[in-house]
Image (spheres, rainbow, N blue to C red):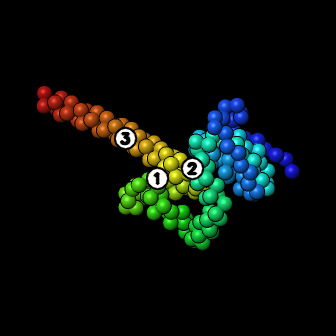
Amino acid sequence: MSTITSGTELRHIQNRAYCRYDTANAEKIVHALDKGNVPHFARYNQQALSLTYDSSFQAVVDEIITKTESGDFEELLLEIQDRKNVNGCRILVPEVADVLEMSVGAVNSRPDEMIDALCLAYIRLWHCDKATIKRELSEIIRVNNFIEEKEESVIHTLLESKEQKIREQERSLQR
């Protein structure tokens, strides 16, 4: 069985802490550490993870490992798959709202595409720490709002130019 290495070079990691876990979820843990910008160096395979990380990120590493090893994610996926409709992931809206520190109504008031994007991103990021999930979900909202603002400004510009043409036509008819 091959061993995979990931992360930064050991010499770039300050305040080193070491740990080893017998886990089949090493790839998920490493993904979460990468997303959370935790300085780390990892060696892992299908059965174990050997991890060196910056000890100032201890709480983040503990949160990631606890979540990943809990088995809750598999339960979450089963619950979503049990939903027979296309919007099965929408059962996550309360959790997404909690992470974003918004009300469920505020999340549900977003366009359907954004709600789906938030829920699917939450599933992909579930293994990460709460701060990372919040940052990534907030970015989805920010980008979507920016696109909507751009679309609104384009529509506004088009309407203004159309109104201006109508006024010009009215003036030419009055002459």
Q: Secondary structure at mark 1?
A: helix
- Tell me where residue 93 appears, x and y as whole percent: 47, 61
Q: Secondary structure at mark 2?
A: helix
* Residue type pointed to by label 3: Glu
On screen, residue 86 versus residue 68, left or right, reads: left
Q: Within 10 angstroms of label 2, few (less than 14), some, or many (20 or more) residues?
A: few
* Residue type pointed to by label 2: Ala
- Residue 13, above or below 133: above
* Residue type pointed to by label 1: Met
**Of the residues tagged 2 and 3, which is closer to the observer?**
2
Q: Nearer the viewer, residue 83 or 62?
A: 62
Residue bearing mark 3 = 149
On screen, residue 83 versus residue 151, left or right, reads: right
Q: Is residue 139 visible in this depiction of the protein?
A: yes
- Tell me where residue 157 appears, x and y as whole percent: 31, 35
- Tell me where residue 41 appears, x and y as whole percent: 71, 40
